[in-house]
Image (cartoon, rainbow, N blue to C red):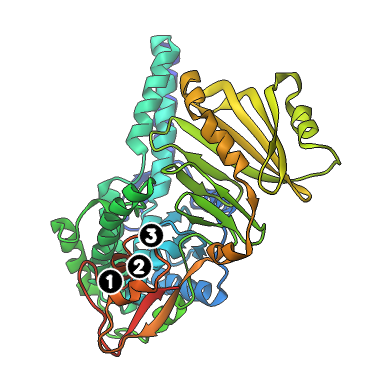
Amino acid sequence: MNKIYLIFLSLIMSYLLGCASNPVTGQQDFVLMTEDQEIDLGEKYSKEVLRQYRAYDDPDLQAYVSRIVEELAANSHRNHLIFHATVLDSPEVNAFALPGGYIYITRGIMAYMNSEAELAGVLGHEIGHVTARHSVKQHSASTVTGLFATVIAATAGVAQAGDAANIAGTALVRGYGRGHELEADRLGAEYLAKTGYDPQEMIDVVEILKDQEEFDKKLAEAEGREPRRYHGLFSTHPSNDKRLQEVISAAKVYKSDNTRKEDGTFLKLTDGMVFGTSEREGVLRNHKFYHRKLGITLAFPKNWKIDNLPTELIATTRTKDAVMQVTLEDLNKKRSPEEFIKAEFGEDLKAGEKISTETYEGYTGIAVVNTPFGRQDTRIGVVFKDKQVFKFLATAKTPELMDQYDNEFISTISSLRALKPEEDKLAEARRIKLIKAKEGDTFEKYARSSPLTSYAADQLRLINGLFPDGQPTPGEFVKIIQ
């Protein structure tokens, strides 16, 4: 009993030492880190983010977003922090904040905005997460849950109790809850008003993103992928949510006399912005992958979900019972594809055979390796291109499914070939182009010459904030895709 008592006493002391004043409310919060530790954590995570994503290569756009974040943050409850803003080169519809003032927004979400005020609405929301220390609270809740799990396990005398408590803790702190999201909206609206923006723009941005999300569900179903959703209250609650309307209205008391006017800068900066996957990362068109710099194309099975990450391609079935990974490495020794693959797997490689694609030579076989489904049979493939090697790892959830999908695995490996001259255009990234609408212009007219292959008119309406049935106004700028 004394030992258990001491453990609980230690937890109580940790709780008392962990309390800190909330920068927004002034009340005591339960957090297990100082502000300096919070900043260090944010810096650490920011490096991880930039290992997974690249910053978008547009210095003017980066500087523009940074300026807006700095101006909003100057009117925040933590204006002593230096905020760091980065536009990520990703088609994902997302924005997020890390501890200590690191704000990220994707070009994917910016494509659906049409004013600086809308952009400020999203950035203000993310700044609100930082000022209220939401991620720090999550981290602290997760930590203390682990501590209590240890106590439960020690008391019960079984490891399973600790596992159960950790599972419960994971569910407890997974994602921001509605309360935190609503608080971030309230704070964001306040910062917008103090900086000269109309806080009502946050409602407008909710409507835009809800339209995009609802449409993308339909498009994702047709393309066999997961829908793109922006996290938080924006994605889970409608713009007519009563509490959301109340917190936005309450922010009007902070309204600045220096009201900002739209000068078209935001739209001008979207002119030429990449839409969809980046040319540098390779372009996905339905189930095919094109990479101009590498000069290759690759065909995945139809209706698989394909994630184009900076260091790898990951393809999964819609039922998530099979997965395929493609990576690229430099070759360092002169040897054949067979020698290369056997040097790594040796006697563990079974059913080895040569592969001749339309352009390149390779080798494939089966080996037992660690996979997301455990240690089991995996299709291994290598294809040589000049001084580099494409490596394929593909497996399924069960041996029966492995047999079922194996022909598709081999077909994908064998599809890797050189890009043909007539396919060069397919490897180009699609871009937003700003044009002035003329009399008689419609989105259906723009769609007929658009490279968008699915619901082109609907997608054009979405990026112009005119979904579901709006039309261009003659004399005004509209965004099209080229």
Badge 2 amino acid: Tyr
| Amino acid on which the number 1 mark rests in the picture | Gly
Q: 90 or 103, which lies in front? A: 90
> Pointers 3 and 1 in contact (CB under 8 A)?
no
**Mark 2 crowdedness (10 Å alpha carbons): few <14, some 14-19, many ≥20:** many
Q: Quadrant of residue 13?
A: top left
Q: Are marks 1 and 2 in contact (CB under 8 Å)?
A: yes
Where's the C terminus, which quadrant? bottom left
Determine if residue 41 is in view.
Answer: yes
Secondary structure at badge 3 equals: helix
Q: Which mark is residue 465?
A: 1
Residue at label 3? 126
- Cα distance in 3D space between marks 1 and 2: 7 Å
SS type, badge 2? loop
Q: Nearer the viewer, residue 403 or 150?
A: 403
Q: Is residue 314 above or below residue 276?
A: above
Which comes before the other along the chain, label 3 or label 1? 3
The mark closer to the camera, 3 or 2, is: 2
Q: Is residue 418 above or below residue 320?
A: below
* Residue appearing at x 33%, y 75% in the figure: 117
Q: Which mark is residue 112?
A: 2
